[in-house]
Every structure is written in structure tokens, then in C-alpha cells.
Image (cartoon, rainbow, N blue to C red):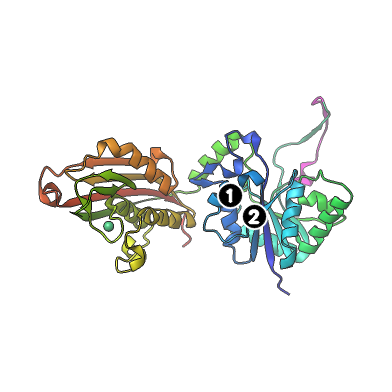
Amino acid sequence: MACSVAAVVVAAGRGLRAGGDIPKQYRVIGGEPVIRPSLRLYAEHAEIAAVQPVIHPDDKGLFAEAAAGLQVLPPVVGGATRQASVYAGLEALVDRQPGIVLVHDAARPFASPALVSRAIAATAATGATVPALPVTDTTKRVDGSGIVIETLDRALLRVVQTPQAFSFAALLGAHRLAVAKGCDAFTDDAALAEWAGLRVTTFEGEPTNVKLTVAEDFARAAVERAAALPDVRAGTGFDVHAFGDGDHVTLGGICIPHDRGLIGHSDADVALHALTDAILGALADGDIGAYFPPTDPQWRGAPSDRFLAFAAERLRARGGQIAHLDLTIICEAPRIGTHRDAMRARIAQIAGIAIDRVAVKATTSEKLGFTGRREGIAAMATATIRLPWALP
Ligand code: MG
């Protein structure tokens, strides 16, 4: 009989070994917080019915930002140990009565949908299971001062990862037993399940499903992430808006005082419109008018940052990232130069990338053509993006 499957994503730790000024699960890697790919993996997996995040009480704002737009349950607050945090997540799921629960560490952002499917299939068969990899290095057991006591038979050793997956009732029972007996030092759920007498089996893990712990892990993961996105594409965008009455223009997401305004259905931010189309072009995913038709009254006067954020999110949903945005604004006036860096900062913020990946340039058209006659502003943009290899 098919039963429902829930996931607990554990993100309540402080992650201090990774350095930085925010907990590691909220640091940005590949253009998004570390926790977001894990939340998305489970939220979008066809076999998962509910995703229960567990967070630290100080991280509510960081979490809300990191999980924006994803279909996950409201987070519950974890405890002082990983074990206590998992237990809080399990108790929050009791009313849903899932048949199977997967427990995943937010610090493992690279787990694949196939791994999740393997975890569910293995648990349906055995009731308690962990992803495992063979040990490839020769492994020694040492004493407290580092002196080798013996060389272990690595054929009998495995390193284990998350998601660890269990019959929900069995894992909840094991956690409740541990609480009742005051045992609170289990560092993974399999160890707790073994202690409670459950038979834990293994299934094939993924070498890429690494845990980010220290600062070097983040540097290596950034390199590996780029290597995992080999499909580099460029897209172009072009837009024009005419001048009309007004006392300012909105360009690149910022307000610039001017003796004319720009006419348009939205806020007429010609620069953000060109950038939006450049990203959609690189994705071969339609254009701005297809998603935000000028005939739709809900976009009247709309701030154009939502258009650019929408395109960036469609890219992230495909598992990709923005490598670079390059914008050229063509007009005789207003002067752009003094606003360039504010514009770069705002575009970087909307697109969710670093400012050194955003270029803003301006030129006149030597008083030729409609821009030369000061009838309007034109903008052209190029977006370079990276995607995983598309499946055939
Ligand atoms: Mg436009």
C-alpha cells in the first residue's frame, strides 16, 4: 500500500566552523542560500507530501527570505542538539501521519531527486535505511594521542549521508524513547535507531552529496557547482520607452530626477525590461510580454523589479545561475554615470547575484535617431547564464 512521505529538513545549528557572520545554512553559494536547494528538492519531489523545516529561533527572518515561494510547512524551532531538533520536526508532523519520513541536513545542498527516490524505495522495503558510500582511503583506528592501534578492513566500512529514511512511527518511537531515558547525544538518526533496536540497512549514496562544514568546503563546493553547470548560454534583450510628462525616470530599479518621465504600462523601467528579456532569452523561455502582458491591468504602474526577479527565479528553478549581466542604456539625458554603481547594486540585489557580476554602461547616439532627438530611452542587455546539462 502506498503511504505518504514527509521530509524533515534540519537547519537549527549555528554552523560556526564554516566562518562567516551568518549560520552556514544561510550563506549564499551558487547565487542562493545553502538551505534553499534542499527545501526545493523536497518541495518539488513528486513522492514527497510535506516538508517540515526545523530552524534556530534567531533565524526566522533569514529562513523566510531563503524559503520564499517554496511550498514548505511553517518552520518549527529546534533544540540545543541535532537530535532535539529532529525530534521537534517529527512531533510537528504527527497529525499528518506520514508512513515514511526522510531526515535531511540543510548543509547538504547537492542531494539529487534520484537519491530521494532511492531512499523512499529502500525504506518501503526495510523500514530504516541510510545512504552510504564505500571508504576508498585506508583507514586507521588511533588512540587519544594519535598512535595507530590497528588498520581497519575498509571493505566493512561505510561513510553515511542524509537523507536518512525511516518508518515514521518507528523513528518517532525511538526518539520518544531516547527523550524518556535522557539519551541526547546521538549525532545521526541511524545511531539513535540502532540504539532503539531497529535494523538499519544501507543504500547507494552520492559522492556529490557533500556536507558543507568548514570554510574550505564552501570554496570547493563553489568550484564544483560551476563544473556542474557546464551549459553556458547568452541571451539578449532590447527595449524602448518614450518620454512624456514627469519629473523623474525609473532606470535600473532606481529613481533618477529628470525633467521628463518615461511612458509605459508598468513603471517603464526600460533597463530592467531589457535585462528580463535577456535572461528569458538565454533560457529560450519566451519574453516579458508573454508573462506580464501590457493588456493586463494588474501590471499598471507595477515596479519592474518583479519582472527581473521572476526571470531570475525561472532560471534558478531550472537549477541554473546567472554568470553575468551586461546593460547598455542609450540616451542623451539624463546623465547615467553618477548613478551607475547604485544601479549595479540594485540590479544585483534583484537578481540575487554579486555586484561584480553586473555591468552598467551608457552611451548617446550622437544626437541621431529617436534617442538623439530626446524622444525616449533605449536599453540593450546581455545575460550570460549557466545551466546543468539538459536531459535529452
Ligand atoms: Mg518595456
Q: Which of marks 2 and 1 is nearer the N terminus?
A: 1
What distance separates the C-alpha of mark 2 from that of mark 1? 8 Å
Disc 1, SS:
helix
Q: Residue 389 carries which label?
A: none
Amino acid type, label 1: Phe
Residue at the farthest right position: 181
Q: Quadrant location of residue 164?
A: bottom right
- Is 175 situated left or right of 96 in this image? right
Compared with 182, 241 (above or below) is below
Total marks drawn?
2
Report if residue 184 is visible in the image: yes
According to the image, label 1 marks what residue? 63
Residue 336 on the magenta segment: no
Q: Is residue 110 above or below residue 222?
A: below
Q: Label 2 neighbourhood size at 10 Å, few (<14), some (14-19), many (20+)?
A: many
Amino acid type for the residue under numbered disc 2: Pro
Q: Position of residue 315 (x, y in %)?
A: 44, 55
Do callouts 2 and 1 mark residues in contact (Cβ within 8 Å)? yes
Q: Residue at (70%, 58%) from the top-left corner? A: 102
**Which contiguous range is marked in magenta?**
145-159
Q: In which quarter of the image is the N terminus?
A: bottom right
Q: Name the residue under label 2.
A: 75
| Quarter holding residue 313 | bottom left
| Residue sitting at x 25%, y 50% | 379
Mark 1: few/some/many CA within 10 Å (<14, 14-19, 20+): many
Foreground pick, 95 / 361: 95
Instruction: Reply yes or no: does residue 157 show up in magenta.
Output: yes
Indicate the quadrant of ligand 1 in the picture. bottom left
Q: What element carries label 2?
A: loop
